[in-house]
Each structure stands twice: as C-alpha cells, then as structure tokens.
Image: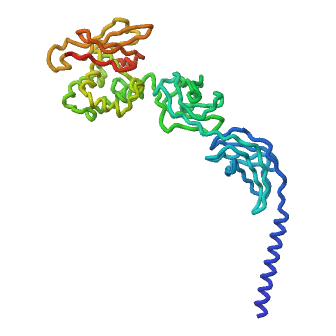
Amino acid sequence: MRKEFFYCLLLVCYTMIACKKDKSENEALTITPFTVEKLSRSIVQAGQELTIYGQHLEQPELTTEVFLAGRPAAIVRGSADSLTVLVPEKVQTGSITVTLGKDSRFSLVYGPSVEVKPTPQVNGFGPVYAYGGETIELYTQHFSPVSEENELYIGNNRLEILSRKGPDTIIAKLPANATPDFLSWRTYNGPLQKMNVLFPLRLVNYPVQTVADWLKLDPAYTYMDTLVRGFPELAANYAAHKRIYDAALAYLQSPDSVYTIFLTNDGGYYKDKVTKADFYQKIRARSYNYNTLLIAAVSPGHALRLEDLQDGDSYPSAYTYNMQWDWGPDDVKNYITIQEQGGIKYAQITNPWGDTGAKVKILRELPVGKATIIELEGELGAVSME
C-alpha cells in the first residue's frame, strides 16, 4: 500500500514539474518585433510569386505565415529579411498580413495592399492560320493596357506586339522563324498561360509531291483535305457522283501530272462564318455540284506561277461537257480567266457561251511537285454546260 502511494505521489510531482516547465518555456517564448517594409510588386495574379521585404520575418522556433486578403499564401522561400510567396487562387485585392508565433501565441503585422488582377485569357485569333512573319489579331481579356507589360509566345519564340485595336484586341507579328507550336502568354509578370491546342501556323513549303498530301499538312486546307479523303462518306449519293470525284482525285493524287488547281483555303469559309458541320452538310446537299467545282478548278498542262498570270489570260479547265453529262464533245470546256484591277489579280470561270461565275481574289501560289495551287479567297465555282 505504501509502495503504491509512493508511485502516485511521484507521478503527481512529475506532472506538476512538467507543467511548470511548459509554463516556464511558454513564458520564455519571445517574439522579436518584426516589420513589413515593401513588396516586390503592387499588382499580382493568381499563381504568381510575390516577395515581401522586411525585418525579422523568420525567427527561431517560430512559425511564419502569410495571408493575402485573408487567404493563406504558401511560402516558397524565406529568410529573416524576405519572404517569397505564391499568390493563391480565387483571391481578391487586399492587404498582406504576416504572422509569427507558436501554439496559441502569435504576433501579426499588416503590410501594403496588393491589387489582384484577373488571369489573362486569349479567346481567339485571326486569321485562323498564318505564316511566320505575318501579322495576326489576338482577341484577349484582362491584358495590361501597357504593351510592355504583356508577353506572347509561340513555342519559345516571342511575338512582337505592334498595337491595340480596342481594349481587348492585340495586333502582333509572328516570328519569322516560328514553327507550329503552342501559343502562350503572360501579363504583369504573372505566370505563363498556354492554349491546349497547337497554333495553326502554316509553312511556306512541305516535303510532299502531290496536292493531296499538301492538303493533309497545310492547316489552311483542313476542310478540303476532309472532302478529298472522306467524300464517299460525305456524299448523299456517292455512286451518282463517283466519276467526277475520281477524275478530280486523279489529279490531286498524281505526282507526275502537270496542272494548276485554283482552290479556296479555309479562310474563305471562316470569312462567311461557315462551320465545319455546315460545310459538310453543304457537300451532302449538293455533292454533285461540289465535285463539279473541284474538277472545274483544275487547269491541265499548266504549272502556273503568280507572275505568269496576266490580265486577260485564259486557261482551259478540266471541266468539260463530257465530264458533266458523260456523253457529247470533250473539247467544250470551262475556262479560267485572269483579271487584274488596281494591282490585284482575280480568277473567274467562264463557259463557252459566255456565262461566268463571280471573280475571286487570288492570294498566293503554292508550288507542289509538278503542280501548283493558286490559292483563292473564295470558291472559283463552275458554270453549267446546259
């Protein structure tokens, strides 16, 4: 009994000594007065690093915490005279607060107010594709009105910001040496943002010998590539139109035939605000006529260049009376006529009886093996042989 009493007394004494020791250590805890003197920037964005400068911001045995507008900001790097924190998500403009403490004892100081800007966004661009060195428009939100505070990149290559068109449109020049890559940006020295799809940058040349292969690689011809490769599935009645489609396909897939084909690029459809779904429905609705347009755009035996096209020149098309009706003369053809007005060249299709389609602006030439694509702003069209 005495032995048990002795152990109980010993336990009580030990507890009292331990409590006294904790109380003594807690009373001995000293928080040296600390200060927040300045910030590395007064405007920030979520995900950006912000450095706080001051004195005694980290102290032995004490925990340092930072809050921005009441939300905790993770400390990336810290020392006695500076703290680098990560601006938290969904934070609003407000003051910096720094606390130092241990357990329930702490001290805090308020720092300067920080303006939090929304994350910058690129919602779109125009044209829908471009070559390196060309000028594009970027449709943006939450970018700085000061050009020097904005950065735009394609891959690791920086775009040159030329001007603004309204508060949310940036005019920029693509680097001449740019290759297809992701578009990224930042503003106010914030974190880098990036599109999740490749920017549709065109190359001046592709290592191919056929127009069909060119259409697969050049992002300006995604619609035409889909048509060429997928027409049997797109056609409402493929059997009735197979002859014309196969004739056009024979040119596009040939590495040996010499010809020029006058093709619109995707921009012609985007310009008219035609979606891919609407475009494919257009093919289903008039598949015979559409393949007539394709074969009418071919001029056999000519690998033309832009400088070759002179006002008044006329080139026979592969679209003949026999091609339309599968009988009758094969020398009755459509013709592709060149017009020049004000230094701008146009192509226009005409039938033997003088009926014409609308003239279409010529944009550029694209040499492909033994053939040439003459790129147009819209469809060249076809004129009926009736």
Horizontal and vertical percent position of residue 253: 30, 25
**Residue found at the far left of this picture:** 327
- In percent of width and height, residue 335 lies at 28, 12
| Residue 206 visible in the shown view | no
Looking at the rendering, which quadrant does residue 322 occupy? top left
**Residue sitting at 79 percent across and 77 percent down?**
15
Nearest the viewer among 136 and 56 is 136
| Residue 352 in picture, x, y percent from top left | 23, 10
User: Where's the N terminus, which quadrant?
Assistant: bottom right
Specify the farthest residue to the bottom: 1
Q: Indicate the position of residue 95 as horizontal and vertical percent values.
A: 73, 46
Q: How is the image coloured?
A: rainbow
Q: State which quadrant residue 172 falls in.
A: top right
> In which quarter of the view is residue 173 placed?
top right
Query: From the viewer's perspective, is 241 left or right of 139?
Result: left
Quadrant of image for the C terminus: top left
Query: Closer to the camera, 364 or 128?
Result: 128
Residue 24 can be seen in this image:
yes
Answer above or below: position of 224 versus 15: above
106 or 30: nearer the eye? 106
Q: How many marks?
A: 0
Q: Is residue 336 above or below residue 92?
A: above
In this rendering, the answer to whether 301 lies above or below 51 is: above
